[in-house]
Image (spheres, helix red, strand yellow):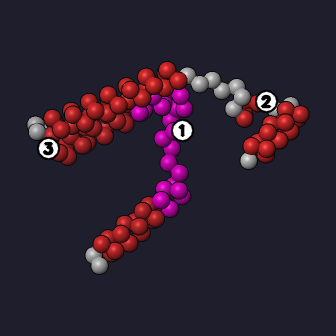
Amino acid sequence: MDDRAAEKRQTAAAAGVSDRKYGKGRNDDVPRGIICMVVATILFAAASAASKWLVGLYPVGEVLCLRSFASLAAGAAMILPVSGLSAFVTIVRATTWRAAFRNRSRSFACSWRSV
């Protein structure tokens, strides 16, 4: 496998294709990745604790709805500046197939449990 990858790189270099495609120009920022993982863990724990606390005050459905809306808003705040509204476009054919397979697998799983 490594011989083929090296061969591709040499062929691409001979053809004038940049090595960036093959990972040569990539910069790893390990400290930034670690900080992002720690922040994500803290936010996940805070969201879980807040949900458990809010369930004691409000109905479960309302808490789930607000949590989903907050996740959508936070995700949109990060995604929209980079890719615009095209990130939220639905491919109808793929969605239809995914729904069909999901429904079929659910019916099979439910029939298997009842045996």
Q: Predominant secondary structure in magenta?
A: helix
**26 or 105, which lies in front?**
26
The amino acid on which the numbered mark 1 sits, given as a three-letter code, is Ser
State the CA–CA distance, disc 3 to disc 1: 34 Å
User: Dot 1 lies on which element?
Assistant: helix
The amino acid on which the numbered mark 2 sits, given as a three-letter code, is Ser
Task: Give the number of the disc on residue 86.
Answer: 1
The amino acid on which the numbered mark 3 sits, given as a three-letter code, is Pro
State the CA–CA distance, disc 1 to disc 2: 28 Å
Instruction: Give percent across and percent down for residue 105.
Output: 41, 67
State the CA–CA distance, disc 3 to disc 2: 57 Å
Instruction: Give percent across and percent down for residue 11.
Output: 86, 39
User: Which residue is most to the right?
Assistant: 14
Packing grade of label 3 (10 A; few <14, some 14-19, many >=20) is few
Task: Report the residue marked by disc 2.
Answer: 18
Instruction: Give percent across and percent down for residue 95.
Output: 48, 56
Q: Is residue 83 above or below residue 64?
A: above
Task: Report the residue marked by disc 3.
Answer: 59
Q: Is residue 12 above or below residue 95?
A: above
